[in-house]
Amino acid sequence: VLSEGNKKAIKNLLQKIHSQTEVLGAEALARLFECHPQTKSYFPKFSGFSANDKRVKHHGALVLKALVDTNKHLDDLPHHLNKLAEKHGKGLLVDPHNFKLFSDCIAVTLAAHLQEFSPETHCAVDKFLEEVTYQLSSLYR
């Protein structure tokens, strides 16, 4: 559960990354592919898996933009993320463990790029991404 302090930290962070979604998203996704190569199987149309690849940039940006968009919905993540959960759970059949793997890569990427990634922010990001992961995995229960 996100505290009010967590929500404030997340809102501040998401506002800061709003203009960097393509770069940060591509790097996070490339980290996922490098550290967990089995996740590449969900992206059969990708010809490359580096942060410079056009499709990696596009999909990474989509993911981070979706996270930035949650900024307005922190009090109603289950409802807000329902369509994404349905798409990934029923349509794409993504193993829900991969959401956790990707969350970790996102957190590492943010920490590497943002000076304001304090221990408190790190804690808030972990809780936030844990909640997002939980909601995206909701259709598997």
Image (tube, rainbow, N blue to C red):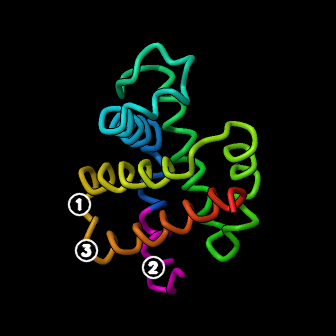
Image-based side of 118 in relation to 59, left or right: left
Q: Is residue 35 above or below residue 129?
A: above
Boundaries of the magenta span = 1-13
Image-based side of 95 in relation to 117, left or right: right
Look at label 3 and name its amino acid. Pro
Residue drawn at the location 51% of the way across and 23% of the way down: 55
Look at label 2 and name its amino acid. Asn
Q: Is disc 3 surrounded by few (<14), some (14 to 19) or many (20+) residues within 10 Å? A: few
Q: Main secondary structure of the magenta part?
A: helix
> Residue 110: which quarter of the image?
bottom left
In the picture of the structure, the residue carrying the numbered disc 2 is 6
Q: Locate the C terminus and report the quarter of the image it occupies.
A: bottom right
Residue drawn at the location 46% of the way across and 36% of the way down: 22
Residue drawn at the location 76% of the way across and 51% of the way down: 83
> Residue 104: which quarter of the image?
bottom left
Q: Position of residue 82 (x, y in %)?
A: 75, 58
The circle drawn on residue 139 is none
The circle drawn on residue 119 is 3
Marks 2 and 1, how far apart at CA: 18 Å
SS under mark 1: loop
Q: How many marks?
A: 3
Marks 3 and 1, how far apart at CA: 11 Å
Mark 2 or 1 closer to N-term? 2
Mark 3 or 1, which is nearer the eye?
3
